[in-house]
Amino acid sequence: MDRSTEKFEVKNLNTEYIGHSIVYKKITDSTNTECKRLCDSRAEEGLTVVAEKQTAGRGRLGRQWDSPEGTGIWMSVMLKPQVNPERASKVTILAAAAVYMALKDMGIDSGIKWPNDIVIGSKKICGILTEMKCTGENIDYVVVGIGINVNTEKFPEDLAEKATSLKIETGQFVDRNELIGRILTWIEVFYQSFRTSGDINKVIEIVRQGSIVLGKDVLLIRGNEEIQCKVRDIDNDGELLVEYKEDGSVHRVISGEISIRGLYGYI
Ligand code: BT5
């Protein structure tokens, strides 16, 4: 099949509202930024922005997200959960579980690297960035951005060590339209219970099942600080319980500003 004729037409979408309105862009700065612009003009919950290419794709803490044209999924979904703003960060793990399940539906095994990455083997195929706007104790909106390397064949040198794509891993072209539809469908499944009560029990089950960090020795990185520890559990709130190597003490790690890395590489 000639892939240059691939058209944007979401498939396998089975939702009540998520992804019913999709803004499709050939090019944008960042789908998260574009989605936030639309949120500010009172768009409906479930609005989704998809782009073929991002010129200023963003990771966490101001990092860059490489988003070349036509090979990846660069998309953002707008949600308006009626929960305490403190729970908004759970949307990241919710989206990770959705990507993991959508890939499973398509016969692709992946792993969830807490808090916001999906990996295959020892490399990253997907990153998630959740941003929100609040007024006082109320959430105006949460935008969850998902970046997936789908049919990417080659990465820039600085990413080659830690990034991979579905195509590289499976040896096959993967239908982005189908994957988008399946991800949005799983997001809605998990979001239904989260929306008003903040409940993520089902998500946690999936995250425990798919986690690549449970039981592993990892480096916890917070700013310039690096702590060697073992991951003991993912608790019912989706946070990590780790045991410090140094003194055996157990700590609860809240996702926010933390990264984790294997002792000898990315995983
Ligand atoms: C993330 O941040 O992993 C969140 C990435 C979210 C991207 C999506 S795309 C749609 C939406 N619109 C946006 O502007 N963003 C979201 P973090 O954990 O901080 O990881 C960022 C790091 O991943 C970078 O510093 C690179 O080392 C690496 N990286 C950059 N581009 C990559 C890619 N395409 N594949 C794998 N790794 C990448």
Image: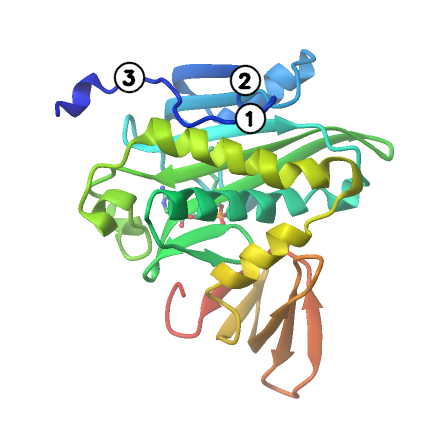
- Which of the two marks, 2 or 1, is nearer to us in this view? 1
| Residue matched to label 2 | 20
Q: Is residue 16 above or below residue 126?
A: above
Callout 2 secondary element: loop
Q: In which quarter of the image is the N terminus?
A: top left
CA neighbours of label 1 inside 10 A, class few (<14), some (14 to 19), many (20+): some
| Residue matched to label 1 | 15
Q: Determine whether, in the image, residue 56 is placed left or right of residue 40.
A: left
| Residue matched to label 3 | 7
Q: Can residue 155 be seen in this view?
A: no
Q: In this view, does 181 lie above or below 124?
A: above
Residue 114 quadrant: bottom right
Q: Is residue 39 above or below residue 190?
A: above
- Which of the two marks, 2 or 3, is nearer to us in this view? 2
> What residue type is disc 1 on?
Thr
State the residue lying farthest toward the right: 136
Q: Is mark 3 within 8 Å of ligand 1?
A: no
Spot occupied by residue 48 in the image (x, y as percentages of width and height): 53, 22
Q: Residue 40 carries which label?
A: none
Which mark is first along the chain, 3 or 2? 3
Q: How far apart are marks 1 and 3 (CA)?
A: 21 Å
State the residue lying farthest toward the top: 41
Residue 32 quadrant: top right
Q: In this view, does 228 lie above or below 65?
A: below
> What residue type is disc 3 on?
Lys
Q: Are marks 2 and 1 in contact (CB under 8 Å)?
A: yes
> What residue type is disc 2 on?
His
Spot occupied by residue 85 in the image (x, y as percentages of width and height): 78, 40
User: In which quadrant of this rendering is ligand 1 seen?
Assistant: top left
State the residue lying farthest toward the bottom: 247
Which mark is first along the chain, 1 or 2? 1
